[in-house]
Amino acid sequence: MGRYVLRRLLQMIPVFFGATLLIFLMVNVMGDPIAGLCGDRACDAATAAQLKKEFGLDQPVWQQYLTYMGNVFTGDFGTAFNGQKVTELMSTSFPVTIRLTIVAVLFEVVIGITLGVVTGLRRGRPVDTAVLVLTLVVISVPTFVTGLLLQLLLGVEWGWIKPSVSTDAAFGELVVPGLVLASVSLAYVTRLTRTSIAENKRADYVRTAVAKGLPRHRVIVRHLLRNSLIPVVTFIGTDVGALMGGAIVTERIFNIHGVGYQLYQGILRQNTQTVVGFVTVLVLVFLVANLLVDLLYAVLDPRIRYA
């Protein structure tokens, strides 16, 4: 196991540098940060040159990237154009988005897997058909429509929740935004679990466990569900980073000042340091989540061994 983890960590190094280099080139080459900094009125040549020198934009792109990566390893993600450290923005936004992501993943795990198990065991019955139709509707409706409808009904019309979330955003305030963020992924988890349960239900090891006289709940939990969760865990593991990075719409609807909000503001204002810094951390989240998913395979399936 230790050798496998070490090998995976070494494999993550080129992936990390490749992903950060790609986003760095996309942000710095395809846009004009100085134009965004100056606003609607274009800067004069002297001011533009001074700003480029101040933010290191007068250097070649490869040198800018090396300087940026050197600073990243010291914990410095640069300074936004408003003079605020990017690490300060991260310290206020990442905790909020992490809480939002935790709520969303809990919805996926609890509701998605439960519905998937129920429908997988009752494939072809009315409850299976109803859940399939419901998940299809959820997948078909855009997230911003779902969020606005829930905000209008639960917040404005019925007054059950606050229409917008406070700055610190406690877990209790993030239940509805978390449900909105997880809605599409929850539907996919339900369908994926249903399909996996229905396929493994006919496997030989399940029939053997039933023939041995094991209790039904033990057959389902210890044998059927455990082996059926491997594709589900894969999806949820990769979805963690997607939820954190893709929360822009949800955070805008509920006025949550998290990672999605900061990315939106950075893109809108062409604030390259903010965008590159936040995406760099999200790349690390993706890599760590994928490593944890691979390690969970051995926990779910004892036949999997890592050398």
Image (cartoon, rainbow, N blue to C red):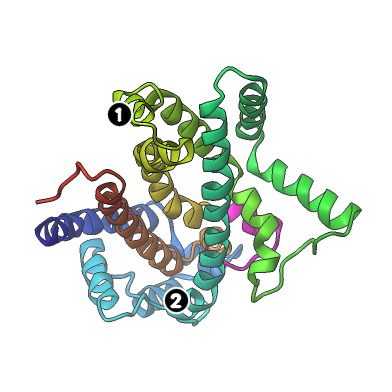
Q: Residue at x 44, y 59 (%)?
A: 32
Answer with mark 2 or mark 1, whichever residue precedes in sequence: 2
Query: Residue 262: in sight, yes or no?
Result: no
- Locate residue 167: give its quadrant: bottom right
Residue underneath mark 2: 86
* Position in image of residue 238 (x %, y %): 39, 48
Residue underneath mark 1: 205
In the displayed structure, 261 sits above or below 127; it is below
Residue at mark 2 to residue at mark 1: CA–CA distance:
53 Å
In the displayed structure, 25 sits above or below 74; it is above
Near mark 1 (Cα within 10 A), the count class, few <14, some 14-19 or many ≥20, is some
Q: Residue at x 58, y 59 (%)?
A: 103
Asked whether 58 or 222 is in front, the reply is 222
Asked whether 83 or 305 is in front, the reply is 305
Query: In this image, 170 relative to 75: left or right?
Result: right
Q: Which residue range is magenta in the image?
A: 248-259
In the displayed structure, 92 sits above or below 271; it is below
Q: Callout 2: helix, strand or loop? A: helix
Query: In this image, 238 relative to 248: left or right?
Result: left
- Locate residue 176: give its quadrant: bottom right
